[in-house]
């Protein structure tokens, strides 16, 4: 079950593990026109959510903590992640998208990643 990654040391080992999990997730999860993929990308400071149609390779809607409205907001990272989920859910609904496939991006479904999914559900998206 090798994926061609070198064994790393320290923090690089975590990055390799996330990449390996992401490859495993992407084998099973892909977006279509009817049910695009909600991708969550997480860094130490920010979180980005995009709704992607994999057949065309287009990003349909996106939201992030890098946007001015959320960058100025106060709160914990989990709370801001929930707001990103709500925002991407509202934008998806406005674009006519009601169902998505959730792609956790190799991260564990916990904390900020789970908060994005909960926020999208609150906005009316079906995951």
Image (tube, helix red, strand yellow):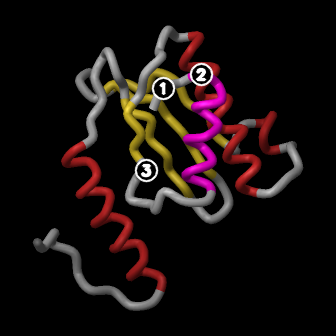
The reply to whether callout 2 and callout 1 are in contact (CB within 8 Å) is yes
Earlier in the chain: of badge 2 and badge 3, it is: 3
Q: Which quadrant of the figure has residue 121?
A: top right
Q: Nearer the viewer, residue 98 or 68?
A: 98
Q: Which mark is residue 126?
A: 1
Q: Which residues are magenta?
A: 112-124
- Which secondary structure dominates the residues rendered in magenta? helix
Residue at screen point 34% across, 22% down: 35
Q: Which mark is residue 98?
A: none
Q: CA distance from mark 1 to mark 3?
A: 15 Å
Q: CA distance from mark 2 to mark 1?
A: 6 Å
Q: Which mark is residue 104?
A: 3
Residue 65 at x, y percent in the picture: 69, 44
Density class for disc 2 (Cα within 10 Å; few <14, some 14-19, many ≥20) is: some
Mark 2, residue position: 124
Earlier in the chain: of badge 1 and badge 3, it is: 3
Density class for disc 3 (Cα within 10 Å; few <14, some 14-19, many ≥20) is: many
Residue 42 at x, y percent in the picture: 54, 55
């Amino acid at each position: 079950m090798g994926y061609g990654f070198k064994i790393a040391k320290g923090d690089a080992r975590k990055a390799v593990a996330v990449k390996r999990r992401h490859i495993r997730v992407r084998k099973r999860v892909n977006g279509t026109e009817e049910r695009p993929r909600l991708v969550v990308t997480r860094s130490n400071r920010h979180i980005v959510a995009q709704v992607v149609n994999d057949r065309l390779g287009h990003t349909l809607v996106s939201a992030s903590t890098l946007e001015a409205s959320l960058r100025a907001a106060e709160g914990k990272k989990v709370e801001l992640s929930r707001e990103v989920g709500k925002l991407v859910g509202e934008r998806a609904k406005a674009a006519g998208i009601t169902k998505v496939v959730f792609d956790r991006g190799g991260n564990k479904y916990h904390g900020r990643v789970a908060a994005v999914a909960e926020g999208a559900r609150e906005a009316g998206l079906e995951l």
